[in-house]
Amino acid sequence: MIQTTIGIEGMACEMCEAHINDVIRKTFSVKSAKADRRKKQCVVVSEEPLDESLLAKAISDTGYALTSIAAEPYKKKGFLGLF
């Protein structure tokens, strides 16, 4: 599993977060997508690495600005995310 953290500028509200989550889920086969306007990012968990050029196009087509992409192996946390 891969965790991809995507930097995104332009999200201003919960609807913006939902819009980003929907676009990512429709474009890629992902386990989860969680956008956060305050952190200016979306964290995506997927089985396979995301195609960065397709990701950049999907984000820019929504009107938001992609600022960064960082992928790393997903580390599942234990009970309640405490360990």
Image (cartoon, rainbow, N blue to C red):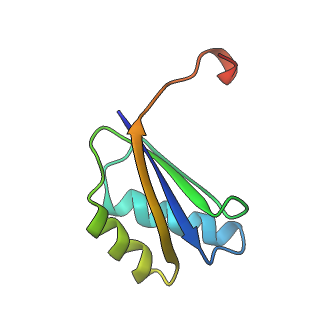
* Residue at image location 26% in from the left, 59% down from the top: 51
Q: Position of residue 69 (x, y in %)?
A: 43, 58
**Looking at the picture, does residue 51 appear above or below residue 64?**
above
* Residue at image location 64% in from the left, 64% down from the top: 40
Say whether residue 34 is left or right of residue 68: right
**Looking at the picture, does residue 61 appear above or below residue 25?**
below
Q: Position of residue 77 (x, y in %)?
A: 57, 22
**Looking at the picture, does residue 24 appear above or below residue 67?**
above
* Residue at image location 62% in from the left, 78% down from the top: 10
The quarter of the image holding the N terminus is top left
Q: Position of residue 62 (x, y in %)?
A: 46, 80
Q: Nearer the viewer, residue 71 or 47?
A: 71
The quarter of the image holding the C terminus is top right
Q: Position of residue 73 (x, y in %)?
A: 39, 33
**Looking at the picture, does residue 39 appear above or below residue 32?**
below
Residue 45 found in image quarter: top left
